[in-house]
Amino acid sequence: MIEDLQADDVAKTPDESTILTLIQDELSRCIGLDADSDLNAARGKAMEYVQGVMVDLPPAPNRSNAVTTDVRDAIETVLPDLIEVLANDGVVEFPATGADDEEQAAIETEFVRSVVFDDNPGFKAIQDATRDALSIRLGVIKVWSERYETRQEEDQAGVPMGSAAVLQDQGVTIEDYAQVDGLETFKAVKVYGKGKVCVASWPPEDFGYSRDAENIAEATYVVARERVRAFELLARGYDADLVAQLDASGAINDIMDKVRDVAASQSYETHQGGIGNHRIVVVLEHYIRIVGDDRTVVIHRVVTNADATILLDQGTVTDIPFAVGTPYPMPHRVMGNSIPDMTMDVQRIRSTLLRMGLDSGYFALNQRPVVSDQGQNEHTLTDVLNNVPGGPIRVKTQDGVSYPPSQGVSFDVFGAYEIMAAMIENRTGIIRAANGLNSDALHDTMGGQEVLNAASQKRTRLMARNLAETMIAPMFRLVHAACREVIKEPVVKKLSSTWRDDIVPAKWRARGDVTVDVGVGSGGRVEDMAHSREILQIQERLAQNGFGGTMVTPSSVHAAVNRLVRTFGVKNVESLFPDPSKAPPAPTGEGEQDPAVAAASAELEMKRQEAAAKIQIMREDAQIKAQLAREKAQNEMTLAREKMAMEANLRREETRMRIEAGLMTQTPINIPVNRPGGDLSA
């Protein structure tokens, strides 16, 4: 028991019994895993609502069981905007510490981005972790390193004496050594150790931390649970006797496993166990801070079985390799709220309203009849129960079957349905118009709709900033530290359209600062494009007003173009717009130009400019004359139309006056009797 441990025992480097006792105590009190049944139940319920399963809202018998998917709609609406920001190449970078560190900081930033997105499925890891955070409060990303060895062998036969010794001095292992006739024969073996940095999302239901933690990087205790095949543990180098003691196990968390398994691809009754080294076992990876002999705090990494009674591995690390984020953070807590926490009650209400509206329609089309005992015959009840459209009801008297007036619903069901939709928008900041054109937006003013969109973008960008600061930036720090730890040989990578073969992360210095580039309140990629274009326009105006070469330089223009093109989603900008600072110098001619030739060239250039000026004047003169001719013709046409209109008005006025004076001659109208339409006298 933990009470049996003495303070001096904890202060010293812990033995196996001590560290297992500490871990068992922390495991029983941590937030997450099986120690927190309320959290697991809340996560399971949230995932059910995401999938449109509402066990807590059973339908009444013979009534509608329709449900709304407001929780899922909100998540799917905001997720693309968040991923566009969080999985963007420029969301984080390592700032330079001085003028001489600018280039190196840029190299390290681009290298780490390449490790995340090129060497690992970084996009999927960020998307999965973000979806987990939106759905069940916490998104988790793990960063770890792996080392592997490559063996290179070469047979040497009949080489001079002393060759093996020279190779041994160079770190080569000599095997099968023999001397024949004064010559050496052996096998030269060179082992190359390489390191790899891995990035992946981690299920939040398989992650836990101490209750007093406010930041995972500084938490006293963190635990991660993994379901793995026994042979995989053997491949990682764990002791075979210890692995043999691990019991077979199946689903880690039945609640979350079942709600995640939307395709019903797993059978939980037969999922348990396995045979031999192919059996599924559960291991826990613990990270616990313990005071060492010198009173310094050391992070111990301990791998145990599911109940922390078998110690599989133990060591020390410099960082806890997890980065976590939450969309709606709670001050002084690791975990905040999720979208289901803010919208599940509204989904229940909207589902109830939707069922009421549908039931009202069903009852209006299928009313309950009143059957009179005196007016029915032997066929009446059968005909009433056989509710076929257009089917007759046979009765004895006319009033044998009657339908009372439908009561309906005494309030506007679908009006209330829309009110609850607006409540979700107000709570989360996720508006329906962001998921395409909302029909109601057609009736709103343009300014009002823009205000709603701007407010939604601000809250979405704030959510993105929270996730970037708490999950993406720590992930980049961990990747940088892991690269420094395991990548000790030069790496060949293409950075900024240039192949580099001199990058050795082991020689980098530690970097703790990471700059996050997520503008709170900005309008996303469209607004970034507009800002980039505005910068280019400002540079153009400055260059036209005499500031070229001072405020506007080739490098500054290239930076602005680089920023604009990156907003288009183009990564390899250098292939389209090369950096002018890396351009080769312009070729210079040998010797000086003959003064006579220079003078002739200048005179010829002056005449060319004079001719061009005359041509320009003639062109402008012709344009002015043509414009005057067009205006004259237009004026003449206008005057002619006005004259015709005045004459027509005068004729109408004259005719009116003649009619009033009785001066108009009455002319008889003769209609022929025989006409194509028929004989009028018939």
Image (tube, helix red, strand yellow):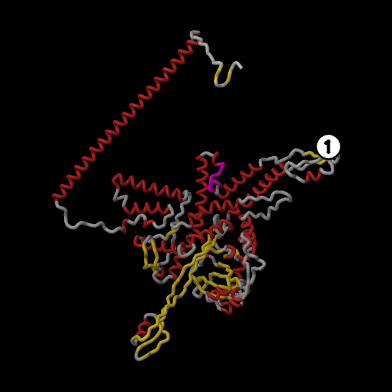
Name the quadrant containing residue 204: bottom right
- Which residue carries the number 1 mark? 397
Q: Indicate whether 229 appears above or below 102.
A: below
Q: Quadrant of the N terminus?
A: bottom right
Looking at the magenta stretch, what is its main secondary structure? helix
Name the quadrant containing residue 95: bottom left
Residue in the picture at 46% in, 62% down: 117
- Give the secondary structure at mark 1: loop
Q: Quadrant of the C terminus?
A: top right
Front-most of 385 and 331?
385
Residue in the picture at 49% in, 60% down: 123
The answer to whether residue 650 is visible is: yes
The answer to whether residue 12 is visible is: no
Q: Which residues are magenta?
A: 432-440
Front-most of 18 and 543?
543
View extreme (right): residue:
374
Q: Percent from the top left, x then y, of residue 538?
A: 36, 46
The amino acid at mark 1 is: Thr
View extreme (left): residue:
596
Q: Percent from the top left, x then y, of residue 372?
A: 83, 40
Residue 215 shown left or right of residue 33 in the figure: left
Query: Is 439 within the magenta?
Result: yes
Query: Is 216 within the magenta?
Result: no
Q: Percent from the top left, x then y, of residue 23?
A: 58, 71
Q: Percent from the top left, x then y, of residue 647?
A: 41, 17
Residue 101 shown left or right of residue 342 in the figure: left
Front-most of 398 and 194?
398
